[in-house]
Amino acid sequence: QVQLVESGGGLVQAGGSLRLSCAASGSIFSINAMGWYRQAPGKQRELVASITSGDSTNYADIVKGRFTISRDNTKNTVALQMNTLKPEDTAVYYCNAAVRSYRGTNNYWGQGTQVTVSS
């Protein structure tokens, strides 16, 4: 069984920073793409940023220049550094990973971590 556990959410004032972390554990052979998604109340879940096993990154336009995604393949972790936060960044943030295990390659999600940005 594979688990993703996020940490690092919280309450911050506009203009502030937060760093989210996600650790994958379990029977993992390798991890392909990893990413962060978010879902605000009443809205659909959306991609924030993703990173391949070769460290190629992709960002939603609304976070480009403010957020940075990174990963440590030796520890099966992915992080999201969020700077210059805005109230509209308020959402539950979810970690996602495409994990290859004895079950084949499957998509896994973390439980989510709340990020609240006050104005």
Image (cartoon, grey):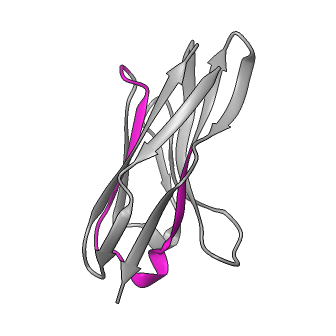
Residue 1 is one of the magenta-drawn residues? no
Instruction: Please state if 117 lies on the left or on the right of 111 as rendered.
Output: left
- Residue at x 42% of width, y 73% of height: 116
Q: Nearer the viewer, residue 48 or 55?
A: 48
- Residue at x 74% of width, y 16% of height: 104
Image quarter of the N terminus: top right
From this view, report whether residue 101 is shown above or below residue 99. Answer: above
Locate residue 50, reporting x and y percent: 52, 47
Q: Nearer the viewer, residue 99 or 117?
A: 117
How many marks on residues?
0
- Residue at x 36% of width, y 84% of height: 118
> Residue most toward the bottom?
119
From this view, report whether residue 70 is shown above or below residue 67. Answer: above
Instruction: Please state if 84 lies on the left or on the right of 33 as rendered.
Output: left
Instruction: Please state if 34 lies on the left or on the right of 71 as rendered.
Output: right
From this view, report whether residue 91 is shown above or below residue 1. Answer: below
Residue 81 is one of the magenta-drawn residues? yes
In the image, which residues are magenta? 74-95
- Residue at x 57% of width, y 43% of height: 110
Locate residue 109, reporting x and y percent: 63, 42
Locate residue 57, reporting x and y percent: 46, 47
* Res. 66 image quadrant: bottom left
Locate residue 115, reporting x and y percent: 43, 67
Image quarter of the C terminus: bottom left
